[in-house]
């Protein structure tokens, strides 16, 4: 019992340290992306969402891996509607929103639907535009994109204020992360990105991952890479995943949980980039006005 109380005390103290006045100009939107699968991107998106809630931000998590969604699985949820139903005109976007742990709002996608993985750009843009019609108050939205360089990844990243690139310290992850940064910079006009080193053994290893990518990017690309920090290798993440719970909920005092809080704090301190890239943006208008909910058809 004393250990549990101590963990909760750490959780409350760090949350209080992050809590500042929410932004006045609509929700902050952060896309979480990775060059390759299996680097822990969705786990990071879920736990950053929990850290934002601790920081007293009303938070939404969009599962933007439209054909291979897994946020609902990570959290042990069983949604009755998802984004495929929205595109089919069977429900509105608001109808898909479900509540996860601690009040985290989840917009689930579908899994195993080839049609969802082959949407056109206009369909992606229509989906992004539908978020402007939501009336639920939101301070932060995290967009868990698919892994890789697909059109959906590029469009969702363009529509977000910041892109968080998740990378591990292995050659394939580093190579694919650089390829992602290159495409988002050159083809999508994204001038800066935030880097998170995942599953590293020491802070020095995380910084080394960042330095290696920076050296190549500085030489060949016109892009700014900022280092948000690292998430350590932590068996508590594995245990919490088996329980289908975020580590911040299952083990709030774990080293990885503390790392997520620190990264969330840094994110909230970043001044938002102004202006849409590619003429698209989430929440173009502030979330105000009754009856603004939008339905879409394919």
Image (spheres, rainbow, N blue to C red):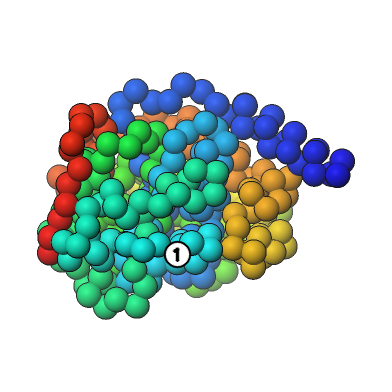
Instruction: Pinpoint residue 164: horizontal percent, then vertical percent.
Output: 43, 50
Instruction: Pinpoint residue 169: horizontal percent, then vertical percent.
Output: 59, 64
* Residue 20, placed above or below residue 262: above
- At x 64%, y 68%, the residue is 242
23 sits to left or right of 103: left
Q: Quadrant of residue 108?
A: bottom left
- At x 31%, y 45%, the residue is 160
- Residue highlighted by disc 1: 78
- Assign a secondary structure to mark 1: loop
Q: Is residue 205 visible?
A: no
The quadrant the N terminus occupies is top right
Instruction: Pinpoint residue 156: horizontal percent, then vertical percent.
Output: 28, 54
* Farthest right residue in view: 2
145 sits to left or right of 85: right
* Residue 87, placed above or below residue 107: below
| Front-lying residue, 249 or 35 | 249
Instruction: Pinpoint residue 110: horizontal percent, then vertical percent.
Output: 34, 68
The quadrant the C terminus occupies is bottom left
- At x 60%, y 58%, the residue is 245
Dot 1 crowding, Cα within 10 Å, few <14, some 14–19, many 20+: few
- At x 20%, y 29%, the residue is 289
């Amino acid at each position: 019992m004393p250990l549990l109380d101590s963990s909760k005390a750490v959780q409350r103290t760090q949350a209080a340290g992050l809590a500042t006045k929410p932004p006045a100009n609509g929700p902050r939107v952060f896309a979480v992306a990775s060059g390759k699968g299996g680097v822990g991107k969705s786990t990071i998106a879920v736990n950053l969402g929990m850290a934002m809630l601790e920081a007293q931000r009303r938070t939404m998590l969009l599962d933007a891996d439209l054909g291979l969604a897994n946020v609902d699985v990570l959290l042990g949820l069983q949604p009755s509607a998802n984004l495929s139903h929205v595109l089919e005109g069977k429900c509105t976007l608001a109808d898909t929103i479900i509540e996860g742990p601690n009040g985290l709002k989840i917009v689930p996608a579908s899994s195993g639907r080839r049609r969802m993985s082959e949407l056109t750009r206009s369909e992606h843009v229509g989906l992004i535009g539908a978020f402007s019609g939501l009336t639920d108050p939101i301070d932060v939205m995290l967009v868990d994109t698919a892994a890789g360089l697909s059109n959906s990844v590029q469009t969702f990243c363009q529509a977000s204020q910041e892109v968080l690139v998740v990378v591990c310290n292995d050659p394939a992850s580093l190579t694919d992360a650089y390829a992602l940064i290159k495409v988002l910079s050159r083809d999508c006009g994204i001038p800066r990105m935030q880097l998170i080193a995942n599953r590293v053994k020491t802070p020095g290893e995380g910084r080394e991952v960042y330095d290696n990518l920076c050296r190549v990017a500085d030489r060949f690309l016109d892009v700014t890479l900022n280092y948000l920090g690292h998430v350590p290798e932590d068996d508590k993440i594995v245990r919490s995943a088996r329980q289908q719970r975020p580590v911040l909920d299952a083990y709030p005092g774990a080293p990885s949980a503390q790392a997520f809080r620190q990264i969330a704090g840094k994110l909230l301190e970043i001044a938002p980039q102004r202006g849409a890239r590619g003429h698209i943006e989430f929440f173009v208008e502030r979330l105000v006005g009754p009856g603004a909910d939008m339905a879409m058809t394919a």
